[in-house]
């Protein structure tokens, strides 16, 4: 709430509910499928290494990183980092996540356009995520339309980043399933279960985008109210 009597925050409630559900879904799905061993019996690190090598990405290193569900691909250092629960586990959840992150490495190597766009706007989005709201609030408090507009512009970069992230994540998941099946690491009856964990992870990005859009609409409404 930016000031007394502002009820625009109610716009955020549906997105907040979706965010909470997405977090619950990804955690519960990962916990469930982390107990289901894959038939191929390879760990997440082994799967990632094999898939990277098959795509001529032998120079991409694989490292174990601390934290839960902290898995990611770092394009700057060309390192695929896997959490302990994925790195050394042979579960279907680990299989899917390791292949998903490998998909990002392949996107980077292939020059996947949405990924390039995301990397380009990342610095602006990082600035907007920390400064956008503050600039808007200061503009609201000091009755400065220019500050409010600057805050809106900065936060718009955050929303754009969240939106372009969606095709990047969906494409990486699609690549993951295709690679696992094509290389014989995933049998037909294991596909639906593996998709479940990837779909749950994708939902968190959808929720983030929904929250960003609603927050931006809220800022625009407050800005118009000040005119």
Image: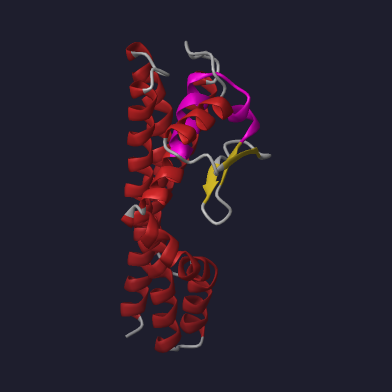
Secondary structure predominantly adopted by residues drawn in magenta: helix
Counting every numbered tag in the picture gives 0
Q: Is residue 93 magenta?
A: yes
Residue 41 position, x and y percent, is 53, 13
Closest to the observer, 127 or 138: 127
- Residue 57 image position (x, y, % from top left): 48, 41
Judged left or right of residue 35, residue 20 is: left
Residue 10 appears anywhere in the view: no
Q: Is residue 42 above or below residue 157?
A: above
160 vs 144, left or right, is left
Q: Horizontally, is 67 left or right of 57 in the view?
A: right
Q: Residue at x 61, y 29 (%)?
A: 87
Residue sitting at x 38%, y 69%:
156
- On the question of residue 132 being in view, the answer is yes
Residue 92 in magenta? yes
What span is in magenta? 83-102
Q: Residue at x 36, y 46 (%)?
A: 206
């Amino acid at each position: 709430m930016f000031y007394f009597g502002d009820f625009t925050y109610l716009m955020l409630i549906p997105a907040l509910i979706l965010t909470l559900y997405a977090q619950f879904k990804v955690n519960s799905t990962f916990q469930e499928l982390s107990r289901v061993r894959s038939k191929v019996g390879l760990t997440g690190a082994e799967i990632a290494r094999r898939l990277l090598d098959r795509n001529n990405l032998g120079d991409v290193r694989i490292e174990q990183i601390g934290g839960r569900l902290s898995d990611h691909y770092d394009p700057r250092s060309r390192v695929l980092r896997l959490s302990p629960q994925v790195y050394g586990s042979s579960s279907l959840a680990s299989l899917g996540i390791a292949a998903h992150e490998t998909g990002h490495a392949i996107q980077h190597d292939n020059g996947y356009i949405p990924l390039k766009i995301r990397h380009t706007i990342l610095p602006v989005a990082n600035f907007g995520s920390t400064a956008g709201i503050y600039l808007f609030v200061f503009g609201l408090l000091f009755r400065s339309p220019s500050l409010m507009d600057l805050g809106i512009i900065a936060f718009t970069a955050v929303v754009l980043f969240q939106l372009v992230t969606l095709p990047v994540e969906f494409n990486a998941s699609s690549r993951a399933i295709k690679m696992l099946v094509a290389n014989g690491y995933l049998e037909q009856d294991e596909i639906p279960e593996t998709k479940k964990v990837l779909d749950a992870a994708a939902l968190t990005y959808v929720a983030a985008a929904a929250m960003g859009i609603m927050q931006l609409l809220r800022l625009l409404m407050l800005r118009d109210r000040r005119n």
